[in-house]
Amino acid sequence: MSEETVEKIFEAVAETAPHIYSGLLHRREYVQTENPSAEDQLEADIWANELLKEKITGIDGVGEYASEEEHDVTDCGEGLSVAVDPLDGSSNIPTNNIVGTIVGVYDEELPCKGRNLVSAFYVVFGPLISMVRAEDGEVNEYVVEGKKDSDIEIHLASEDLELPEPKIYGFGGNKNWTEDFRKLENKISEQYKLRYGGALVGDFNQVLHYGGVFAYPKRTDAENGKYRLMFEGNPMAYIAEMAGGASTDGERSVLDVEAEELHQRVPFHAGNTELVESLEEELGN
Ligand code: FBP
């Protein structure tokens, strides 16, 4: 049963979250390795991936596990495919700013389109450990408490989250924006307040709560921007759309982008529908 499997995946991530959080203290150094996207890895990136991989691949009904930290998909039986960014925003770890975990659960072999998602969620390691989960047309928020497996509790904090009237924006990659995007940012900055922290989970999470738009667009030096479609773009676009908002790669919903490679990148924009639509229109001109 795929609903039961999704529930087990969600619980496994919730139970692992406090372990990841408490283990960050001694794993804040860069090691001499790169991930498949040629980014330097912290000891924490590798370790969080190992913890999550062990838990998730052990779940009955999980067929594939893929991670932003590993080159290939791991085949682990019959069933759903799980794509994980174990520590999103990990360059925030040395400075002690927000990081998180992003998970997409697909009912298709990876790589595949975001339309194949059956669930997506993310963990925010902030003042609290919280989780936002989108499924069956609803977005709910949870708080995770406790430290050991035996005392971890998951409390529902907010039900059926919807993007409120827009107030803020956050755009990454500013050193290499196109002229069109720079003009657009200029306009948006006159109307909305800038909030940018350098971790997709934190930056998107505040847009979800305050309303607005978040983007990491294409760059003059990177046609497809920075985010990995399977691990970051699709799950966050799925959550944005389920919260009543929209997403775009500049031309179409992120969820409709063809997936050709596991680690392919995608220009990412998501938030309140009216803002995403006007951004898409302006960038298309
Ligand atoms: P990682 O998952 O490898 O940490 O990379 C993604 C990311 O950290 C996003 O969370 C964040 O929005 C972006 O990179 C920050 O990029 P920049 O440092 O260019 O602002």
Image (spheres, rainbow, N blue to C red):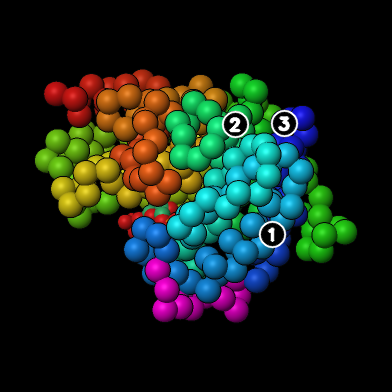
- The three-letter amino acid code for the residue at tag 1 is Glu
Gap in Å between the C-alphas at discs 3 and 2? Answer: 9 Å
Quadrant housing residue 138? top right
Pointer 2: what residue?
107
Residue in the foreground of this view, choosing between 69 and 123: 69
Residue bounds of the magenta highlight:
24-34
Query: Label 1 CB, ligand 1: below 8 Å?
Result: no
Q: Earlier in the sequence, mark 1 or mark 3?
A: 3
Q: Is residue 214 left or right of residue 250?
A: right
Query: Label 3 CB, ligand 1: below 8 Å?
Result: no
Q: Is residue 33 left or right of residue 80?
A: left
Gap in Å between the C-alphas at discs 1 and 3? Answer: 19 Å
Q: Is residue 213 visible?
A: no
Quadrant housing residue 16? bottom right
Quadrant housing residue 156? top right
- The three-letter amino acid code for the residue at tag 2 is Asp
